[in-house]
Structures are given as C-alpha cells and as structure tokens.
Image (spheres, rainbow, N blue to C red):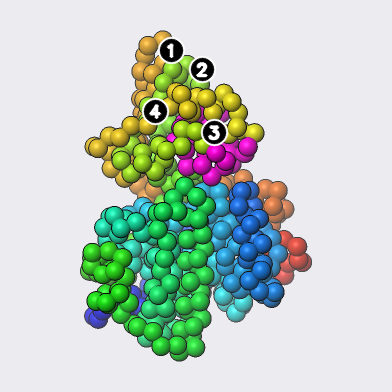
Amino acid sequence: MAGEVTQQLARFAATLGYDQIPNSAREHTKNLLLDAVACALAGDRGEETHQVAAFASALAQSKEASVIGADCLSLAGATLLNGYLITAVTMCDVHRPTLTHITPEVVPPALAIAERDGLSGRDLLVALAAGCETATRVGLGWDFPEARKRGWHGPGIIGPFGAAAAVGRLLGFDDETMARAYGLAGSQAAGTFAAWGTPTVKFHQIRGALSGLMAALLAQQKFVATREFLTAKDGGLYNTYSNGGKPEAAVAGLGKRWELEQIALRLWPSASTIQGFVTAMFDLIGKHRVSFEQVKKLRVFMNKTGVDMHGMFPQYKGKFEALLSTHYCAAVILHDRALTLAQFEPARYNDPKLARFAAEQVETKIDPSLTGIQSVVEAELADGKTVSSRCEHSKGSPENPLSRAEIEEKFRTYGKGVLPAARIEEAIAAINGLENLKSVRGLMDILRTGKEQRALKTA
C-alpha cells in the first residue's frame, strides 16, 4: 500500500473483508471476544465498578445499548461500562510489545454499534479484526519503549484508533472518512503512567473506547480532521508522543502478517506483567510439591520494569493493589494452590498469615538478564534446600497460548451466578460460530440481564 501511514492503515480497515482474514486471525479474534466477555461477566466484582456504573448511567438517559451481565444504557454509557467490566478485575488481554490492553477499547463500541444497527456476527468479526489490528499496528509504529520513557500509557493513546477502526468498519467508511476518524481519535489520545497503582489506569482504557466511538460518529458526519495524524510534523502522534516513532513498522506486512495474533490472554487475574511469574509459581508447586509451610523465603526475579511496577506492594491495601502485588500473589498461590477471583476477596487478602508472609518472606529482585515477562522463582526451604522454576513464556502468550476450551471454561467460571447455565452455553456457541450469527442483537440479548431476550438466529 502506498501513501502516508495513517492513510494506509485507514485504507486497510475500510476495505477489509472476511475472506482477507486468514483462519488463524479469525479464530484468535473469536478468542479475544470470548475472553473479553468472560472478563466482563466477572467485572461486577471490581471494587470501583459501582462508581463507573453510576458515572456511565449519568451520561444520558436513553437505553439503546446492552451492558454485559446487566441491563441497558446509552450508547456512550454502555461503551464505558462494558469497557470497565472487561478490565475491572485485571484479567483481560494484553499486547505486550506496547503494554496495552486492546479489547476494553475495541470490543465495547463495536458491540454497541453492531447491536444498534442489527448487524451480523460476520460484520462484527471483521470489525473487531480491523480494530485490533489497527490498534496494535499504531502501537508498533509508536515505538513504545521511547514513548514509555516519556510516561505515556498505551490504552488511552493507541486504543482510540482501534475503537474508531472497528466502528468505522461497521459503519461502512471509505478510506478517507476512516483516516479522518483516526485524526479525531488521535486528537483525544491521553493517559500517562502517573496513574499507575490506581484504578485510573483502567479509566484510560474506557476513555479510549469512548474516544474512538466519538471519533467515528463525528467522522460519519463528514467533520473535517487531518488525515495524517500519525506522522504530522507538528503535533503528530509519533513526533509528539515519541521520538518520531517507526512508521514503517506500523505497515510492514500489513494484511499479510497479523499483529492481533500477538495479543496475549490471561488465565489468572493479576497484572499482565507478572503473568510470567505466576506461570513459574504454578510450575514450582507442581514440579517440586512445595508447600506454604515449607518455604522459609521466596525470591522472585524479574526485569527492572517488573520489579518497579509490581515489587512496590509488599504491604498492599485493597483488591487492586493485591492484584498488582507480586508479594501477595506468591503467598496466596503457595497457600491455596489457586489464583482466581476468590483469592482477591477481602477475606482472603486480609488474612493475617498471608499478609505477613507476603511482607516478610517474599523478596523481589532485579535480574538484568531477564526480558519481557521472563521470571524465575526460587524457594528456600526450611530444611535448607532450594528449588526453583523459570518461565520463558507465560500461560496465554502467543508462544504458550490458551486453548479455546480453556477460554470457554474461564467464561463458565465467571458467568456462573450472572447468567443461567443455558445462556452461558448459548453465548459460547454464538461466539464460536460468530460468522453464522444473523444479528448481534441476539448475542447481546443472551448476555444482558433484566429484559426478555429475543430469539437467537443463526444460519
């Protein structure tokens, strides 16, 4: 594709068709949707969810869009609340090259528009693929390590582009309208790591979703915006939010190599950066049969980023800090042999025995030789022996992926108590056969509570 990078990415999203998406990318797109909905069904357990629900319902009084596991809100309200539900309990996807969660920004506005307009599951699948691919590729061109030095946080920066791409594809944008939607999306890019350790990092994600929705809806009205936002010399994303970026990386192999397939999933709640450590912990207790009582000292080795971000909570306060805390996760995995949301309830993380072990017997150490999510855990036992385990690729990463069956089980685990068992199975079947779904309204009826559902129709 010739032309400026913003326009190349716009042309890609505007013209993408189902048959252009290879089967592996289609199936991973379904994985991403299935996982996002599973996370959303768990989202009412987030400490701040009720606050975001009140905020979302205050935006407008209309009720045209479904909320997963709840009733209906306005288009904007449902986009915000569904986005928060996906990320609320720190269990959704991550694109590790940019440390960015993608589905909280891309999935909610796509679901809202597809439901509103009665579009098909195939339409939704193509839009989600366009949105996820756009967001990840904008991120590759951004040169995230350089952007990170400036303090930028990915979801609110590159997320709006993915959301705009997904909505624009559903609305049938031509490439010029799509490029202007990107200009409007980029004009709302925001969010820094000053928010780290607080729920505001999740707000960056839902603001990214709403920014992309607004960008696309305004572009639909032919509102004039720059069509070269990414590379504009004065104020363009790559020049202002980075060091000029690597624009060529954003479009290298576009349409041939699918970056969305590099989006990792999480089997366990807890921060994406420590999924490697969690994988190593389960390997340690599985291979060496180490018990909580046997361990005198547990040392966790990660790179500097991992220790800086997650070694700062030896004494944690509340659910969110517990989800981010290497110290607590080590203690509770050793003791419970499990890491589900049950381990992040107040009765569990406030257990004095676990809190004391986390603060006094877990150490985090920087190992400069470790990169990405690579982690080593080393347990010094009461009898003087030392056992260890190393993780190269965390469970759920592209190199060590979750199976569809594992994602389905995650869906069942967190859907239980929110939806009837029969509806859980209907939803799983609908997403697995997304290209055969006549109308996304049928899927949202299954996922919504509080109203009689319409019949689900498939081909």
Measured in 3D between alpha carbons, the distance from the residue under mark 4 to the one under mark 3, in whole angstroms, is 20 Å
* Magenta highlight range: 317-346
Q: Earlier in the sequence, mark 4 or mark 3?
A: 3
Name the residue that disc number 3 marks.
Answer: 338
Where disc 3 sits, the SS reads loop
Q: What's the magenta bit mostly, secondary-structure-wise? A: helix
Q: Which mark is residue 382?
A: 1
Circle 2 crowding by C-alpha within 10 Å: few under 14, some 14–19, many from 20: few
| Residue 148 appears in the rendering | yes
Q: Which residue is mark 4?
A: 363
Residue extending farthest front: 194
Q: Residue at x 57, y 41 (%)?
A: 318
Please name whichever residue, 440 or 24, is drawn nearer the observer in this view of the structure. 440
Determine which residue is flagged by label 2. Answer: 293
Q: What is the C-alpha distance between the residues marked 4 and 1? A: 16 Å
- The reply to whether callout 2 and callout 1 are in contact (CB within 8 Å) is yes
Whether tag 4 and tag 2 are in contact, CB under 8 A, the answer is: no
Task: Say which element carries label 1.
Answer: loop
Tag 2: residue type? Glu
Q: Quadrant of residue 364?
A: top left
